[in-house]
Image (cartoon, grey):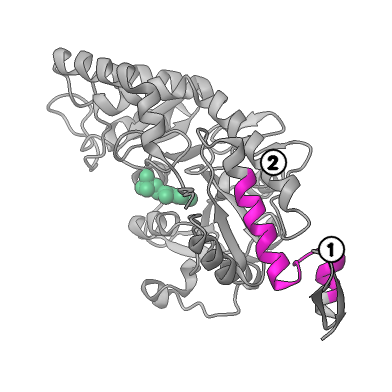
Amino acid sequence: MRKIQFVNLGLQYRSLRSEILAAFDRVSRQGAYVLGKEVGLFEEEFADYCGTRHAVSVANGSDALYLALIALGIGAGDEVITVPNSFLATAWAIARTGARIVFVDVGNDMNINPALIERACTRRTKAIMPVHLTGRVADMDAILKIAKRRRLHVVEDAAQAVGARYHGQYAGSFGVCAGFSLHPLKNLHVHGDGGVITTSNEKIYSTLIQLRNHGLVSRDICNLIGINSRLDSVQAAIARIKLRRLEKWNRRMRFLAGIYSSGLSRFVVVPEEKRYEESCYHRYMIRLEKRDDLGKFLENNGIETKVNYPVPIHLQPAAKSLGYRRGDFPVAEKLADTILSLPLYPEMKDPDVTFVIEMIRRYFERRGSCEKGPAGRARRRGFRFRRSATSKRGCYAKA
Ligand SMILES: Cc1ncc(COP(=O)(O)O)c(C=O)c1O
């Protein structure tokens, strides 16, 4: 049976193997394995790519968000606004500072709904942390306007959005800081864990440089209480190799996403993109009522899918003390029940994408309906697809 993996990291490694092995050899000979020359070079190149003055590499994306908040002086007694439909690390970064997590529901774009932000603000609110989910930048114009009016910091969770644009501007360059993840499943990744914080603020930059290295300002003097969250030189060298290909890979992701969307839009809700948006499609996420059913069907046909994420953060057992309940964030909750991520990676072949589309088409043909369009409407009115006895075609008839 034909198999389509959700991602295939081995393919990318094979195409870069000689360069990566040479980088490993170079760094190993240099002998500076932590915060070495490669780290500095990667940070310069990453900041340049995002259009910020600085980038500070750290051990992972979770630390990137946490340290950004700490550098802004956020802690116990403060509140930070974010969304419940993200990876746990977004909310837990806030909790680790001692600040209170305040969730706001999302809009149809799956990102924070700016219209709901102000009513969640209190005297204690210090920052908004929008998540650019799936690689689509949140509505930054509206968010920045609110932040300015209310004197709030904006820390972007750009973990999924490296290379994504909004009005031509790169994710990670809107807020005072942004946190990126270099986890192996991200569009730009290293061979293990890694993260980056971008900022154009000099003071925050120098604080972050200390915070990620125990608070040390020089070899023996420590100004701040920091942590050990550094990127290894080998990982930085690998990240540099991949950063050079990122634009090409993201273009390919966008191209494949386009094939998916044109093939699937009559069956399911596909990601939309506004004129001024350029998602990097960290995930290609469709929406449909019987998500689990389709996921099972695809799995039985050799196609791996995922749900990112089936349990919103406010409904996690670990979030109980926050006092939220089901029904508090209806859009995020509905998304959690209806989203399905399809396989997508730059090395994926066009026929693989068309195969996935074909299998989804077959699924709907079997079910005799699709979620959208005339067929969906017919189904909702109680009509069912009946195959004709004489041809492959059929029609909708009252069940
Ligand atoms: C939206 C979001 N925020 C934060 C993180 C945390 O990044 P990391 O896994 O590198 O700690 C991730 C990674 O999955 C993420 O998707």
Please name whichever residue, 279 or 89, is drawn nearer the observer in this view of the structure: 279
| Earlier sequence position, callout 2 versus callout 1 | 2
Q: Position of residue 144 (x, y in %)?
A: 66, 43
Q: Which residue is mark 2?
A: 259
Q: Position of residue 104 (x, y in %)?
A: 60, 64
Is residue 311 left or right of 391 when viewed as pictured? left
Query: What residue is pinned by disc 1?
Result: 373
Label annotation for residue 174:
none
Give the residue drawn at x 33%, y 37%. Answer: 194
Q: Is residue 85 inside the magenta stretch?
A: no
Amino acid type, label 2: Ile
Residue 393, placed above or below residue 196: below
Element under disc 1: helix
Q: Which segment did they paint magenta? A: 354-378
212 left or right, relative to 165: left
- Going 81% across and 76% down the picture, which residue do you hit? 386
Name the residue at 31% across, 30% down: 209
- Residue 125, position as x, y percentages in the image: 53, 58
